[in-house]
């Protein structure tokens, strides 16, 4: 989900390869046509996948993408949580990648994961407690926190410590992330 909040932190020059870009939905914090275009300049053969609303959005900027599964990718039911009067709820899909990694987008309403789960931590639509409950229920081997930009650094550090402690007791490794730093998982 290369969104607008990622733009200052994605060091495109340091990327050595990029096979796929997945966009779960059209909200700007998940879908920045400008960032996708910059990635596409360096990696013209990258596959870009999103739901039909994303495909249409990117097409307006001349970026071709697909709303179809392809080798190594399976979609799963992961609806965007309701925005109520705050925002329109977009169409969204979750992605399983290479039978290893799962990204549910802006959802706490999914019931499957692969070994590595990108877990939305907090949002106007969600609750941190529900995120933790999901991890405990689904039991991935690893949790990578996402969607935590609502927290200041002190809050993020404190919540990461709590998640790490609780999930470790459940046999789940919590992989605290640093903004702009890659995450490497050895399976």
Image: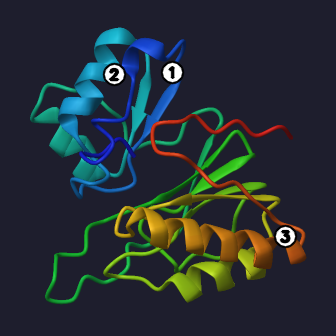
Question: Which of label 3 and label 2 is nearer to you?
Answer: 3
Discs 3, 1 touching: Cβ within 8 Å: no
Real-space CA distance between mark 3 and mark 2, rounded to the nearest whole angstrom: 35 Å
Report which residue position mark 3 lands on: 168
Label 2 Cα neighbours within 10 Å, binned few <14 / some 14-19 / many ≥20: many
Q: Earlier in the sequence, mark 3 or mark 1?
A: 1
Residue in the image at 32% along x and 52% along y = 30
The image shows residue 141 at horizontal and vertical percentages of: 82, 59
* Residue 44 visible in rendering: no
Real-space CA distance between mark 1 and mark 2, rounded to the nearest whole angstrom: 8 Å
| Left or right of residue 148, residue 32 in this image | left
Discs 1, 2 touching: Cβ within 8 Å: yes
Residue in the image at 18% along x and 31% along y = 34
Label 3 Cα neighbours within 10 Å, binned few <14 / some 14-19 / many ≥20: some
The image shows residue 2 at horizontal and vertical percentages of: 35, 41
Real-space CA distance between mark 3 and mark 1, rounded to the nearest whole angstrom: 31 Å
Pick the front one: 59 or 23: 23
* Residue 56 visible in rendering: yes
**155 in relation to 104, above or below:** below
Q: Determine whether the residue tagged by mark 1 lies in a helix, strand or loop.
A: loop
Report which residue position mark 2 lands on: 39
Label 1 Cα neighbours within 10 Å, binned few <14 / some 14-19 / many ≥20: some
Discs 3, 2 touching: Cβ within 8 Å: no
Dividing the image into 4 quarters, which one contains the C terminus? top right
Q: Determine whether the residue tagged by mark 2 lies in a helix, strand or loop.
A: helix
Give the colouring mode of the picture.
Answer: rainbow
Q: Earlier in the sequence, mark 1 or mark 2?
A: 1
The image shows residue 35 at horizontal and vertical percentages of: 26, 31
Report which residue position mark 1 lands on: 18
Question: Which of label 3 and label 1 is nearer to you?
Answer: 3
**105 in relation to 111, above or below:** above
């Amino acid at each position: 989900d290369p969104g607008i909040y990622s733009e200052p932190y994605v060091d495109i020059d340091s990327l050595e390869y990029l096979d796929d870009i997945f966009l779960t939905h059209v909200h700007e914090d998940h879908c920045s046509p400008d960032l996708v275009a910059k990635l596409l300049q360096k990696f013209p053969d990258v596959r870009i996948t999103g739901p039909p609303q994303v495909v249409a959005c990117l097409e307006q900027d001349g970026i071709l993408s697909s709303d179809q599964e392809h080798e190594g990718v399976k979609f799963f039911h992961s609806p965007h949580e309701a925005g109520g009067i705050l925002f329109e709820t977009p169409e969204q899909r979750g992605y399983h990648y290479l039978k290893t990694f799962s990204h549910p987008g802006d959802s706490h309403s999914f019931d499957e994961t692969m070994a590595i789960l990108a877990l939305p931590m907090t949002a106007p639509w969600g609750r941190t407690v529900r995120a933790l409950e999901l991890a405990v229920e689904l039991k991935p081997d690893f949790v990578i926190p996402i969607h935590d930009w609502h927290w200041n650094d002190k809050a993020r550090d404190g919540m990461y410590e709590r998640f790490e402690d609780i999930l470790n007791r459940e046999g789940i490794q919590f992989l605290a992330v640093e903004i702009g730093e890659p995450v490497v998982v050895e399976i």
